[in-house]
Every structure is written in C-alpha cells, then in structure tokens.
Amino acid sequence: MKSLTLIKGATLAFAGAALTLGTVATPAPAADFSGKRIEWIIPYGTGGGSNAWARFYAPRLQKHLPGEPTVAVKNMPGASSTKGTNFFARRAATDGLMALGTSGSTQFPYLLDDRRVQYDYKDWEVILATPVGGIVYVNPSLGVTKADKDGMKKLQKAALKFGSQGATSLDLVPLLAFQILGLNVKPVFGMKGRGPARLAFERGEVRIDYQTTPAYLKRVMPLVKAGKAVPLMTWGMLDDNGNLVRDPNFPDLPHVGEVFETMHGKKPKGPAWTAWRAFMAAGYPAQKMIFVKKGTPADILAAWRKAAQDTINEPGFKEAAAKALGDYPQAVGKKAEVLYKVATTVPPSAKKWVRDWLKREYNAVP
Amino acid sequence: MIEALLAALADITSGHHLIYLFAGVAMGLVVGIFPGLGGIVGLSILLPFLYGMDPTSALSMLIGLVAVIPTSDTFASVLMGIPGSSASQATVLDGFPLAKKGEGARALGAAFSASLFGGLFGAVVLTFVIVVAREVILLFTSAELFMLTILGLSMVGVLAGTSLMKGVLACALGLMVSSIGGAPATGEFRMSLDIPYLGDGLPLVVVGLAMFAVPEIVDLLRAGGSISRSQTLGRGWLQGLKDMWLYKWLCLRCAGIGCIIGALPGLGGSVVDWIAYGHVKQTVKDASQFGHGDIRGVLAPESANNAKEGGGLIPTLLFGIPGSGSMAVFLGGMVLIGLEPGPAMVEGKLNLTYVIIWSLALANVLGAGACLFLSKYVAMLTTIRYAFLAPFMIMVICFAAFQAQRDLGDLIALFGVGLIGILMKRFGWPRPAFLIGFVLADQSETYLYQAVQFYDWDFLYRTGVLIIFAITIVSAWMGARNVPTGESDAAEAAHSRVQNMRPQAWFATLVFAFLAWGLIDGLTQSFLGGIYTIGIAALSLPVAARLMYLTWTNNTAHTVNFDLEVEGDHLQSADTPPLLHYLLWLAAFLAAIMLIGFWLAIVGFFAIFLRVKTDASWLRIAVMTVCGVGFISALAWIMVLDFPGGLLQEAFVLPWPIG
C-alpha cells in the first residue's frame, strides 16, 4: 500500500489554487495528492452503467483533487458486486487513496443480509450520490394510455410477463410495485440485464417493462414516439427531506404512490408499502455513491468533498451530466449524507417483510 | 446512404483519425499475439484514454483494436498450439499440426488471407444490412435462440473425433462444468461448495486456456527441443494465399456463418470458430486429414471469426446489446465518448456508423498486412528451444486467466481444469466438444427457460424454430457420415496398441462421479434451479456407465481405447520425462502462488525453471526474468490490476506489485 505522508507542505500552494478556482465553499484543506495514484474501486465490469458513471467522474474529480492525482478506475466485478466491495472494506486505508463506487445492486445485498456481504456502509464516508429514476412502460396493445383509474383497471385484468434479472436484484422494486398495485405480473428470470429485457419488450414477449432514466431517454423514447410503447408511471424521486415526489425528469408521469391513490382514493400504507419505499430509496434516488473509509483525516475528507463540489459546480458540468447520467441534481455534502442515510437504512420490520415476501413469492433467499 | 458512406470515408482518411486507427490496430496486434489476451484486455487498456476524445477518432481506435485481434491471435494458435484468444480456438486443431510439419508459413498465409476476406465480408454485410437488420433481429426470440444453441450442440458429433461416445460425454462434462454457479432461472448456487469464486461460474477464458494451453505447454516441454520439428518455417506464404483462393467458396460460407452468429444478440461469438470448423468438416468429401493439418481447418475458423466482428456490431449498434465480451467493452467505450447505440445509429448518426464500418474494413486490411509482414519474425519463436519459451507462456496465460475475475481462484481453476484438459488429451477425449458444451450451457438453459415461460411448449412449433430444427437434423446427418462407431476397423485396431486400460477406466469413473454429483446437487435445488443439470446427468450418465464398462473390462478392440501415454509420438525418445514430472512443476508453482502471491512466485519460477531446464547463465536468466515480469507488471499497472496474493499477502501489507 502507498505511504501516508500527505498532510505536510502544500497548504499555501493549495490555498492559492483554491483562490484562483474561486469556489471556496469549505475551508481550504491541507491535503495534497501530488504524484499519487488514487484507486477507485468499481465492483462492476467494464461494460455496464456503473463503469460509465465512474469513467465520467474520474477525470473530473482528478482535476479538482488537490495535487491533481491520477484517479484510476479499478473494475473488480464478481459475486453481485460484493467481491469488489468486500475488497475495499478489507483493504482501504484512511489515507483517501482508495475510493469505492457503489450501486443499488451493492446496497441490496447489504440490506437483505446476503451472506456474501462482509462490508458495512456505516464504516464509510459518503462523498457524492447520483440519483436515477425508473420509468414503467407498457405495450400499446393493452389499450392503456395512462395510469388513471380506468387504465389501471384494464391493466389489472391483463396477464403480464416481465423480464427480470432476479428477484433479489434491483428488480425487487418493480416486482413489489406491481404487487402493491394489484397487477397480475409473472416475472421471467434469467435476463442478463435491462437491455435484454427491453429487447424482449420490443419483440412483444413481455408487455410491461421498466428502464432507468438514461436508458429510457435514449432507447425507449424512440419507441414511445413511434407508438410502440406507452409510459405509465415512475418510481418517483426523493426531495431534500426524503419525501416521495414526482420524478423531475418526467413531471407528467405520476409516481407509484400517486397511482395507488388514484386507484383506491387513499394513500398507500402498510408493511408492503414501507418496504417498497425503503428499497426504492436504496435502489434509485441514491443509486450510485462514492465513498472513502471512515476515520479518514478531516483535511483529506474535506479535500474529497470539495473536489466533488467543485466538479458539479464546473461550468458545463450540468449539461454533460444530464447527457451521461440523466438530468438529476448530483448530491454532495449534506444532501449526499441525507440520501446515503435513506439508502442504507431499512427498518428491521421492512427487511423482514421483504425477506419473507421473496421467499414466499419467488423462493429466493438472499 | 451513399452520401453517408462517402462522407464517412472522407472523415476517416483525414489526418489524425487514421493515426488513431493505426494506434488501435497496433494495440490489437500486440494484444492478439499474446495467448489468451483478447479484445476485453485490449479495450480495458484503452478505456482510460477514451474520455474526451472526439467520437470519430475514438471509434477508429476501438474498432482498429477489435477488428485485428481475430487476425493476430492466429499466431499463437498456429505456432504454439495455444488459442490466441477465444475466437481462434478451432484454428489450433489444424493450424498447429501444419506448423509442426514445417508448414507454418503456409498456415499463416492462409489464415491471414482468410481473416482479411472474412473481415471485409463482415464490413460489406454490415454496410447494407445495418439499415434493415433491426426487424430481422427482432424475429429471433428466445425460442429461436434456444434452437440455435441446439444446432451448436449438434456440432459435437462432428468434433467428436474417433469416438462419438467420448464426444457426447465431453460435451456433457462441459455443460455440467458450466452449470456450476448461479442458476439462470432462480439464482440458486449449483455445485458451488459455498466457495464464492464458484458462485459466479468458471470464466470462459480460464476454461479455454485450461483446455488448450496447459496440455500443450506440458506436452511441448516433455517433447523437448523446439516447436517446429523441421527447424524451418517452410516457404509457402504464397501457397497459403493460393489455398484461400482455391477454397474461396468455403471461406465465403464460413464468413456468412460468422456474420449471422455474431449478429444474434445473446448467442455470443465464442462458438463461431467451432461452428465454422464443424460445418466444413461435415460438408467436405474427405475429412480424414482434419486434425492432422488440413488447410481447410484453418481457413474455416479464420474467415468466420473476423466476419463475426462485423456481424457482432449489428446488435451492439442497433440495440445496445453486445453479442460478445469484447463487444460489451466496446459498448462501454461508445457510452464513454457520448455515443448511444440505438435506432439513431442508422437514422441521424448513419455517418458515424459508416465511420465504424470503414474503420473495420481498413483495420482488417492493415491487420492482415501487418501480420503477413510480421509473421516471418514471430514464427522464429517456434525454432527456439521450448524450455526458454515456457516460463513466458505460463506467465502470459496466468495473466490472461486472472484478468477474468481478478482472483486467485482464476489461477486455481486454470490449473485444476488444466489437469482435466491434460487427461482429456491423454485419453483422446475431444476437447472442442467440451468447450462447445461449456459455452452453450448457459444460453441453452436460459433460452429454454424463457421460451417455455413466454410461449409454453408451443414454442417448438414456431416457424423459426422448425426451420432451425430442420437445419440441425441435416447438419447432424451430414456429420454422422464421418463418425466411426462401435468396433474399430482393422487399421484402427493396428493403431490401438494400448493393452492396459486401467488409467482410462479411472478417468471414465471420475467423469461418471462428477456427472452423478451434478445429479445429486440438482435434486437438492428447487425444480427450476435443478431440472437442467438433472436433465444433462440423466442423458449422459448411461453413456458414462457404458464407457466405464468398456474400459474396466479392458475392451481394447473398441474405438474408445486410446491412451497417448502408450502411443504418443513424444514417447519415441527414451529420456522423455513422465507426465507427472511437469504436473509437479505446475503444482509447485501454484502452491508458491498461494503461499507468496503471484508476483514473487513468477519471479522464482522464472529463475528456478530456467536454471534447471536450460543451461542459461544467471545473468541471462536475470535479464529474461526482468523483461518478462517487467512487461506484465507494466501491463498490470496500466490496467489497474493487482496480482493475486497468497498467505503472505494476507498476513502483511506489501507494496505493489508484490502485495
């Protein structure tokens, strides 16, 4: 592992640099990463969304970290992302030279007490959180044009199939949502990702599907325009206080809670709903997060947080991020911490309910 | 379309794009030459440099890399008998015997010209088909894809070699080994023994190297001397080109096969070479020389595997669904430069699509040209005494193996499955059949499950399924003509000098036990999680039982009787060390890795092996070690890769690259 002599020296130089940058939100940190290489563990392969997210951020963070170290993305896929995450938990020092990028599929095994998990989110400090939304759409042949009372009644009568990666994956959220809304949906497992599921939708093999925001905007919107798909609802998004609100990217689409209210005339509640809220929060509004180890000295932690802040304040960042990650406010500082809390805490009762439900419905044990 | 095509040509031939294309091609050549390293490694090295590049340059570089790997990986397949990447495993079967006969130059000439032909064919197909392919691809549902995996599995008959029984069993073994890990339908862990590494299943690159590279290295070491017996490469580059021209229709058919299989999302390109090879073997009149150096056995996989990349780009660009591992990384690269695959690629962004196609064509020309030029020098490797090459080979295949999961388990699996590969080679079990089973297991199970869910068993009556089924029957029938069964004929009997069949019987028993374990494990799973392995076991266990009977009763006249340790040509010299000798070397190496980690172990292995097995001075050994280990260390640094650690690294935190 690399040496730990970071603290000395460059205070003045860095303060100067910070002044020229002109965005001194936090006190100028004394940390300096000059000539260092920061390893950023991504517990996913080089083909997926988490990799794209990390490669989007790496050069930007690199520019804003004091001393402009090399930020090297280290892909460590395996065991549903628990392998790379366990590696980080075991190996990261408190020198800020190793960071971790997690995704919803890293949060879920943790929340479900998967036996492969040897990491605890409480041991880490969050630097940044990237939200993403989910949009449900259906085949027009169902005759449903929107998620109003009639539309949902029609949908409830249809026997639907849904392409899924597995009940304990992020697909837990749609599966549970369909159940709460009383839809007759049978999952077909073994899809190798959301892409193949969308392909099955295009072939007409499944008539209900969902995609995350970037994939929806780029790959489903053309279908919607061509009259081959009808968007119905979103998972919603969390506001600054953690309340469920409409997805800002899709202000015209109701979220699942609203749809329930339209159908039944009252707000959803009960253990299923509590569980859905908890896992939805863990899977989407704080889907991807950057962490360093807890106990990292204050100056290094501050340098990381400032770098994240400076990155998202950079001119042109918002446009670039909207294109690459979906148009959601990237959360840093206090906001990131709120999201991190929501995403990694699930009431024990909700956890138990979900575990029982997975066992009962899908014979799935995390 | 024509304007877009010409605009793209102007774009790509303008200045710096061409330089990036050259860079990609150069990278692809280097990565391809090293056994086991393929597109995934090459793209992983390039990824960090992509961000911020302009799309045309980045695309040229990516395509340059992807396109030439199936060309340059031929070197290792033909010259070393080690698949250069998973795309040219089948090339080994006839390419390597040709090299041993001193016809390496001819084989390479034929391979590169076939690669060029296939690559250009793929580019042409892509040009015209991309505009209409979307609807066609959507016709292939899970049902048709399942039937295609069955078509692939039916090739086992052709690849079975002398004994259909062993072919079927090798395939079943491949299917069963591939079933280790999460079940597609339920995610239950099958046969994983609670080992996290096995939970993800064994990676293809590890199994491919274990089946072909490990046994070959051991055999070459035992044989002593250099790879090329004749110490010359032979002339015959031109002969190779002429061969390609002579069999141009065969190449055309194989290129077509490569394109189609590559274009089907989810089928994966890793079997393209085998299917092309099997197709040719079953359709030619005289297939007796296949496996002993028939030039058609080189032309077929090589024209198919380059054409595959063109085909593979179709689903990648149109649907964002990669057809193979390297396409998945290519897709990652596209997203990084801000390009989203989708229908827009043939509407608004047709220009960029044609940049890709032109790059593909250009890269194939450059790659084949460079390979022809380089081959004289690369081929000299075969005249070096193998003991000098072996440490490098072992190092590179280990490196290639552990970049799969970046886990010590990769190396353990490499040597563990490698041992199975060695035994299969010894007892004449067809390793291609094993590999076909291994590659198609996951797809066949997943698509069968999905097809039944979507269409019920009625899926069997779908038009597409019936058409593919008919093709399968024809293909199996054509293959069956060449497969000997039952008692062997007189010539074979003379060949089978093996009197003691005990070792074969033990191996058959081992296979039986493993299949039986699969059955027992399947019974403990839920219905959907276990039914597939139960099915494989139920079909194959009777065959395994029959083989056990034949071998334990010492039925030496039967075609199953084969033991390379009794009739192999490496035994002609009296000082050939026993098989166990080099197995112990490998075991000691693996033990050292588990103890002190890969980096220290490979340094030690270089030093000790070279000292014991060659007469090199310590200085020369030091230079070789520094060059070899320095090279992979640099590669690992660029790829942000830790070498697998051992107990030492568990106990102490050590600086990179040791820790």
Image: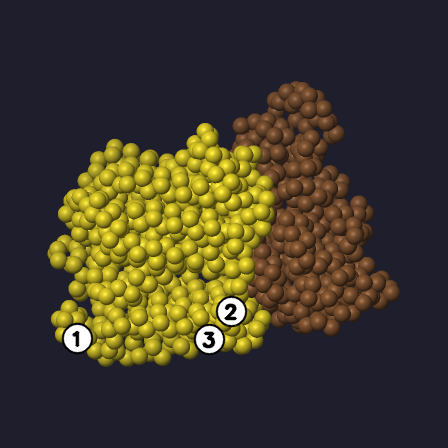
Chain colours: A brown, B yellow
Q: Secondary structure at mark 3?
A: helix
Do the residues marked 3 and 1 share a common chain?
A: yes
Q: Quadrant of residue B485?
A: bottom left
Nearest-to-viewer mark from 2 and 1: 2
Nearest-to-viewer mark from 3 and 1: 1
Question: Which residue is at a point 38% across and 47% down the rendered structure image?
Answer: B120
Dot label at residue A76: none
Q: Secondary structure at mark 2?
A: helix
The relative height of residue A261 versus residue B107 in the rendered view (above or below) is below
x and y, in percent, of residue A271 in the image: 78, 65
Horizontal side, residue B611 vs residue B644: left or right: left
Query: Which numbered disc, 2 or 1, marks the residue that appears first in the sequence?
Result: 2
Q: In the image, what residue type sits under mark 2?
A: Ala
Horizontal side, residue A124 vs residue B418: left or right: right
Q: In the image, what residue type sits under mark 3?
A: Ile
Q: In the image, what residue type sits under mark 1?
A: Asp
Question: Which residue is at a point 77% across and 66% down the rendered structure image?
Answer: A152
x and y, in percent, of residue B152 in the image: 40, 65
The residue where tag 2 is placed is B143
The residue where tag 3 is placed is B534
Nearest-to-viewer mark from 2 and 3: 2
Question: Which residue is at a point 52% across and 41% down the rendered structure image?
Answer: B4
Give the chain letter at badge 2.
Answer: B
Disc 1: CA contacts within 10 A as few (<14), some (14-19) or many (>=20): some
Do the residues marked 2 and 3 share a common chain?
A: yes
Give the chain letter at badge 1.
Answer: B
The residue where tag 1 is placed is B489
x and y, in percent, of residue B60 in the image: 47, 38
